[in-house]
């Protein structure tokens, strides 16, 4: 009598639905994941997804509210884009790493609001279709990985790279990159772009009189005064040595002059931290120039204009603001 050989497990047909064993594995998976059926409704919302979003599966399964687990307003997830054959739209909604259109998969990342938990998380998403044996789309699986810690570490490193170590404001590298970016934006939109360049007056004399630690404190004080007088979307930077620069998007030359005068007055009125240096108050000379229309012709030319204005401010007696062309 022949020994009975147990049947091997065979893949389910579309009519079988999601296989119980595979579904159970997915529910227990440590990676947050959900499955949409062919109608775009949640078929599985696993335990890890519950923990990530703070929303139990009972609230999600059978609904099309899955995006509200991650965002305050409904928006297409990668799974939705696959279901609706709109993978090409992913790049407008997410930072896409792999659009894998030849496989129908897509990988991306982005900041999510997590309305239920109140946390803002940086999540990496991967989504891919699930097909039946006959080739029909059975559903879409999307997984999420929480990369918030890694992303925040990356941003912190980028801030260090783009910040001046002494003053804490933007450094020359950040200034150069921002100027070129704002220049292109101004050229496209037709909005003005103004630039200030300022120099601490007689800084060598200040250093010689009070010492290099006092000179460092002076530069920190000037940087703080500059940063305090600009808008949140302006950029204050240490240009080099005792020189500072300010990029003023959508600011006319008259507006730039007003900002420059506020900075000049604030520095003049600020006092050294050490009362023994009360007689060594710092002042600054400031040059201002604006790109408007097609003039000047390049970011470098704008820098040349503002540098010339600063030169005139220093040679007209210092502690003053001079506009290019005035």
Image (cartoon, rainbow, N blue to C red):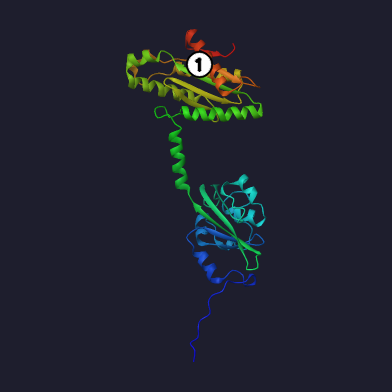
| Residue of label 1 | 286
User: Is residue 112 something one can see in this rendering?
Assistant: no
View extreme (top): residue:
316
Please state the horizontal and vertical placement of residue 82, each as a whole percent of the image.
63, 55
User: Is residue 177 something one can see in this rendering?
Assistant: yes
Name the one closer to the observer, 310 or 216.
Answer: 310
Residue at left offset 56%, top offset 25%: 248
Name the one closer to the observer, 170 or 90.
Answer: 90
Quadrant including the C terminus = top right
Please state the horizontal and vertical placement of residue 158, each as a whole percent of the image.
46, 37
Position of 142 compared to 294: left or right? left
Residue at left offset 58%, top offset 22%: 194
Label 1 sits on a secondary structure element that is strand
Residue at left offset 59%, top offset 23%: 298
Q: Is residue 203 above or below residue 81?
A: above
Position of 162 compared to 70: left or right? left
Please state the horizontal and vertical placement of residue 199, each as a whole percent of the image.
46, 17
Disc 1: CA contacts within 10 A as few (<14), some (14-19) or many (>=20): many
Please state the horizontal and vertical placement of residue 214, each as a whole percent of the image.
34, 20
Position of 90 compared to 307: left or right? right
Residue at left offset 52%, top offset 50%: 123
Name the one closer to the observer, 1 or 39.
Answer: 1
């Amino acid at each position: 009598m022949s020994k009975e050989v147990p049947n091997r497990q065979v893949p389910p047909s579309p009519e079988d639905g999601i296989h119980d064993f595979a579904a159970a594995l997915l529910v227990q998976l440590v990676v947050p994941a959900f499955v949409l059926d062919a109608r775009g409704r949640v078929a599985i919302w696993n335990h890890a997804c519950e923990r990530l979003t703070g929303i139990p599966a009972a609230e999600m399964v059978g609904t099309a509210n899955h995006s509200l687990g991650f965002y305050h307003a409904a928006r297409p997830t990668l799974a939705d884009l696959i279901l609706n054959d709109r993978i090409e739209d992913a790049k407008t909604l997410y930072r896409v790493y792999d659009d894998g259109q030849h496989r129908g998969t897509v990988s991306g990342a982005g900041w999510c609001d997590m309305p239920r938990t109140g946390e803002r998380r940086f999540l990496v998403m991967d989504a891919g279709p699930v097909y039946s044996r006959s080739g029909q789309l059975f559903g879409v699986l999307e997984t999420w990985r929480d990369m918030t810690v890694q992303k925040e570490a990356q941003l912190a490193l980028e801030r260090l790279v783009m910040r001046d170590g002494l003053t804490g404001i933007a450094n020359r590298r950040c200034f150069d990159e921002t100027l070129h970016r704002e220049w292109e934006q101004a050229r496209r939109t037709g909005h003005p772009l103004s630039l200030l360049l300022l120099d601490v007056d007689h800084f060598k004399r200040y250093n010689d009189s009070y010492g290099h630690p006092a000179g460092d404190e002076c530069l920190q004080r000037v940087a703080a005064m500059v940063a305090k007088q600009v808008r949140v979307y302006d950029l204050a930077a240490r240009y080099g040595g005792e020189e500072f620069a300010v990029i003023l998007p959508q600011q006319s030359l008259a507006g730039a002059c007003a900002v420059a005068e506020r900075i000049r007055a604030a520095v003049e009125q600020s006092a050294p931290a050490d009362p023994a240096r009360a007689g060594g108050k710092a002042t600054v000379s400031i040059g201002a120039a604006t790109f408007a229309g097609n003039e000047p012709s390049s970011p470098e030319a704008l820098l040349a204009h503002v540098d010339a204005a600063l030169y005139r401010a220093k040679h007209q007696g210092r502690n003053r603001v001079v506009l290019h062309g005035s």
